[in-house]
Image: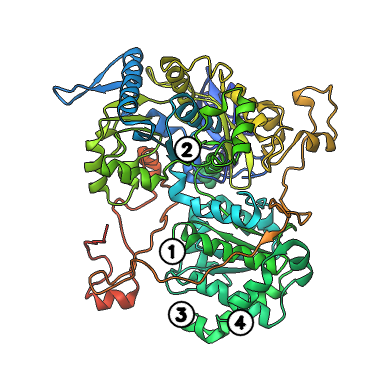
Amino acid sequence: MTEELALSDAAFGLGKLPSRLRPEATVRSVCGFCSTGCSLDMHLREGSAVNLSPSVLYPVNLGMACPKGWEALTPLDAPDRATRPLLRNRSSGRMEPVSWDRALTGMVERFRSVMDLHGPGSVAMLSTGQICTEEMAFAGALWKFGFGALHSDSNTRQCMATSHVAYKQSFGFDAPPYSYQDFEQSDVLVFIGSNLCIAHPILWQRVLKNPQKPEIIVVDPRRTETAMNATQHLALSPKSDLILLYGLAALLIQRGWVDIDFVESHTSGYADFSEFVLEFSLERVAAETGISAGQLLRVAETIHRGKAVSFWWTMGVNQSHESTRTAQAIINLALMTGNIGRPGTGANSITGQCNAMGSRLFANATGLLGGRDFLNPVQRAEVADVLGIPVERIPQQNSLAYDQIIEGVESGEIKALWIIATNTAHSWGGTGALGRALQKLEFLAVQDLYTTTETAAYADLILPAAGWGEKEGTLINSERRLGVVRKVRRAPGEALSDFNILRLVALYSGNGPLFKEWSSPEAVFEILKRLSAGRPCDITGIRGYGHLDAAGGIQWPFSSADREACGHSPSSGGDKDPLPVSERRLFGDGLFFTPDSRARFIYAAPRAMVHAANSEFPVVLLTGRGTSAQWHTNTRTGKSAVLRSLYPPEVYVEVHPVDLAGLGLASGDRVRIRSRW
Ligand code: SF4
């Protein structure tokens, strides 16, 4: 019993630890895996983190962490860390250690020579949602304003570009409106394409803290762990989500269960939408989704009776068929029932990566810094003014998107590529074809923690990068909360933070003067604040990293006016700043970010799947995360024996018993799966 108590105290960073384990100092840092954005207390000995525990007084995780968070330090100790720049010897084909000077001189020369010969569209950058916001902004600014390149995109394109577009079109800005407190304040929670239990386990814990015994409706073809805990599970036919959502809208209208006051005061397009959805009769929707009329009526009635209904979606929507329209069909349900802007409500996309939200706002990839548009001359001028650069340096065209960059590599249009902190050769569909394409490149630079990723195998140059815990910067979580990542370890060998690599590349490419002000992550944070001024994501009220730490992270927007409204005295210093309310949601005033401040009802007739099942490929494959202990392509989580023990050693599929019998297979059999890809 005593031992148990001691362990429990230790787990929360409290109580008296044996001196062997007692930390000399504790530093708080936001976790670098998923978008939940938990805070971890890093316990240091001799200035280096030896252990960690989840932060108790942090509004996101309230003392909890998933297995990945508990094991966050382990991947830093892996033996395959990149510790020196490696350059491919053209004669032997082997990767050989070189100095940073040689690596960067060669890299800049290669990109420059390709661009000189083939133009600014012949090179591209593929980046990530896994590095700090300041690093993303630096990478995107250096690449486009410094090098003069046109194309860069982030792997967040693969996760959630669809939600980003859905919000922009419906709300006027990419603005997930919620706060995690909404999980605890809803009396009806609707999850669509979200296995929250497994993919976002700490957020599921927030649902379990809901004191109201809420109705939990799960829309998912599979009986997932989340579906098993639902009060209503709609096991719809794969890819019929849009029809289901339009059918529910039609039912709500037919029954008169619409918040007409809200619709008339705060939205536009409802009249046309209500006419459009009437073709989704109960009979049609039941037939096309496989959900019975009775179940559909029960769901509509539950939504109607709910006092605070929240709608949540994740990758099952984002990465599926007609994703943008599906996300907007969810948004439409929230708007027409007035479930937005109040506690426990919202049309809420839960993101994936720890800094997907930072990427969406500040990566300067397919959108201009601060959620702006490269095609908008006024916004280009704003950015040039803030950065003090000639406006001509800002491209007047959009970048190719991630998939188009890959196509460009395959076609030979893209001849040199810089990949930062993402494992494209594993994560992109059709890996064999992609591998052959990467080999065609004249030059491939890979910036990563490890030398052994599938992508690093094709590199001409590997730049050794520091990992989470070995550098500093901010991340933005799913609920728009900025939190600070702290340096609690020294990177191995000659590895450098992505930020410092970018500083060096700026110098070696002759862009030092242009990026003189970009001297440290916190200096760049000040630039980001200026870029956000007057935008929906205004963060000018955040004084700096100390303010973020003291506040337990701060959600955007938090403008200077917001800071003053919560009691700031202009003479007060950083630590004396008043702390904002720790959980805030958007649209409480019913005003959206569109020119007329009204949210839009957006819809379109459902289209047939492009690659539907047929006689050659008779089975629909749905992907999903099977475990909370694995992340992305496993480059980091695969390094932990603890995490490896929490998931099966081999890839597996689950097949419906009826399909299984039809295939003449039994549970546990080995199968070979072939897809069009
Ligand atoms: Fe929290 Fe996500 Fe980190 Fe797990 S991986 S501790 S849920 S932020």
In the rendered image, which residue does mark 3 sit on?
288
- Check if mark 1's residue and mark 2's residue have beta carbons within 8 Å: no
Location of mark 4 (residue)? 297
Q: Earlier in the sequence, mark 3 or mark 1?
A: 3
Disc 1 marks which residue? 321
Task: Name the kind of residue labelled 3 in the image.
Answer: Glu
Q: Nearer the viewer, mark 4 or mark 3?
A: 3
The reply to whether the C-beta atoms of the residues labelled 4 and 2 are less than 8 Å apart is no
Dot 4 amino acid type: Leu
Which structural element holds mark 4? helix
The colour style of the image is: rainbow
**Element type where label 2 sits in the image:** loop
- In the image, what residue occupies the spot 32% across and 43% down? 408
Q: Earlier in the sequence, mark 4 or mark 2?
A: 2
Disc 1 on helix, strand or loop?
Answer: loop
Q: Earlier in the sequence, mark 1 or mark 2?
A: 2
| Contact check, label 3 and label 1, Cβ < 8 Å | no
The residue identified by callout 2 is 130
The disc, 2 or 3, on the residue closer to the chain's N-terminal end is 2
Foreground of the two, 87 or 40: 87
In the picture, the quarter occupied by the C terminus is bottom left
Query: Where does residue 214 sit, x and y in percent of width and height?
Result: 66, 67
Left of 7 or right of it: where is 464? left
Residue 527: % across, % down:
63, 26
Residue 490 visible in this rendered orientation of the protein: no
To which quarter of the image does residue 409 belong?
Answer: top left
Of all residues, the one furthest to the left in this rendering is: 91
What distance separates the C-alpha of mark 1 from that of mark 2?
Answer: 26 Å
